[in-house]
Amino acid sequence: MRALVIDYGAGNLHSIRKALEREGARVTVAAPSGGSLARAEAIVLPGVGAFGAAVARLTPALDGLRSALRDGVPCLGVCLGMQLLFDASDEGAGTALGVLPGRVRRLRSARSPHIGWNRVAGSALLDGRDFYFAHGFVAAPDDPRVVDGWSELDGDRFPAAVRSGAIRGVQFHPEKSGAAGLALLRAFVEEAS
């Protein structure tokens, strides 16, 4: 499976690439363009960064990315990458991909940003496992049926994973989450193959 890890000037490009390759993917890291999108059998939007800056860098390619995702190309959004799947964010200006209706809001916790391990519940693949989080914002989907796993911090319950068709997003960093994270990446590579 050929995976395109989108380079938008932020993100854990090296670690997500290595983790995907470990699970059997052939990975290209590139800015999204007509050629790179046409060759991709799966798309990964990596984490780390600020929403406004990421949207600004992606703006020339948003229509192409939207088209690929609507055509069924499997996608995994990681942390900020998951947030980019939604319409907009309280963190910064700009309109993101909007393939999942909803907005990204600030995490309601005195410990924001949330950096560390947290349990995920409500998903067959993720339930009861701990994953590594590094975020201060969380998705607020318009349709709660897209939520594929929850986490909670100081009473703020938020989507830790979302899924709609071939589009999947996780608020945590699977590439930094040991065996549980690699199991998630392996499942993504297998499903996309």
Image (tube, rainbow, N blue to C red):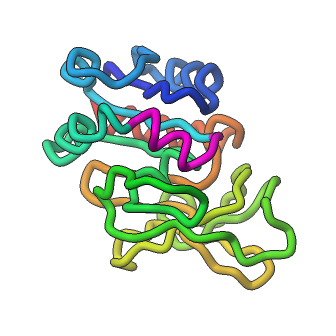
Q: Which SS does the magenta portion mostly show?
A: helix
Q: Is residue 146 magenta?
A: no
Residue sitting farthest toward the left: 71
Q: Is residue 97 above or below residue 54?
A: below
In this rendering, the count of numbered labels is: 0
- The answer to whether 51 is drawn above or below residue 186 in the figure is below
> In which quadrant is the N terminus drawn?
top left
Left/right placement of residue 84 relative to residue 68 reads right
- Which image quarter holds the C terminus? top left
Q: Nearer the viewer, residue 150 or 82?
A: 82
Q: Which residue is painted at 63% across and 35% down in the image?
A: 175
Residue 17 in the image: state x and y as whole percent. 54, 21
Residue found at x 35% / y 76%? 145
Whether residue 73 sits left or right of residue 87 in the image: it is left
Please, which residue is most extreme toward the right here? 110
- Range of magenta residues: 48-58
Residue shown at 73% from the left, 49% from the top:
132
Name the residue rendered at 26%, 26% in the picture: 41
Residue 34 place in picture, x, y as percent: 21, 21
Frontmost residue, 86 versus 75: 86
| Residue 179 in the image, given as x and y percentages of width and height | 67, 39
Q: Position of residue 110 (x, y in %)?
A: 86, 75
Side of 72 relative to 119 (left or right): left
In the picture shown, does residue 151 fall above or below 186? below
